[in-house]
Amino acid sequence: MKSFIPLFVLLLISHKLEAQNCPPGRTPGIINVCRHPRARDCIGVGSGNTCENLGVGSFDSGFTSGLYQCTIYSGLGCRGDSEKVDKVGPNKFRLNPRSILCPCV
């Protein structure tokens, strides 16, 4: 059962990535949001120039999967206070992100 859960999460992320609005040849940027400092217990979330609301929970740190910046927001729908996140990290968040926005890369 434990091996099924990561497979399901990867399948879900893959499906979400295909649904993004990136031009041909470009893929959605991915931010890894982590429940613990020092990049532990992380989840990759894709966003191709579209706002993505995060699930329930608290995220303490994170980093992008490439040489680009994503923005985290304190409110749903990419509203509220914001903070830029890049690959250098893990980046300790000043706010608890509720939504994210990454570019197409």
Image: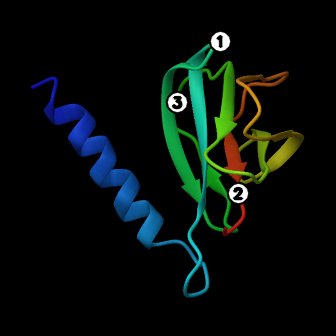
Residue 54 is left or right of residue 74, and the answer is left
Answer above or below: position of 81 versus 25: above
Which one is in front, 95 or 24?
24
CA gap, disc 2 and disc 1:
21 Å
Secondary element at image label 3:
loop
CA gap, disc 2 and disc 3:
19 Å
Question: What residue is drawn where x is 31% and y is 42%?
Answer: 9
Please report whichever mark, 1 or 3, sits nearer to the chain's N-terminal start. 1
Q: Which residue is mark 2?
A: 102
Give residue 1's position: percent from left, percent from top: 9, 26
Mark 1: amino acid:
Pro
Which one is in front, 64 or 9?
64
Give residue 91's position: percent from left, percent from top: 76, 25
Question: What residue is drawn where x is 87% and y is 42%?
Answer: 80
Please report whichever mark, 2 or 1, sits nearer to the chain's N-terminal start. 1
Q: Quadrant of residue 63?
A: top right
CA gap, disc 1 and disc 3:
18 Å
Please report whichever mark, 2 or 3, sits nearer to the chain's N-terminal start. 3
Of badges 1 and 3, nearer the viewer stands 1
Give residue 40's position: percent from left, percent from top: 52, 16
Mark 3: amino acid:
Val
Q: What color scheme is it?
A: rainbow
Name the mark on residue 21: none
Mark 3 and mark 2 in contact (Cβ < 8 Å)? no
Q: Residues within 10 Å of mark 1 (few under 14, many from 20)?
A: some
Name the mark on residue 37: 1
Secondary element at image label 1:
loop
Mark 2: amino acid:
Cys
Answer above or below: position of 87 versus 46: above
Q: Which residue is mark 3?
A: 56
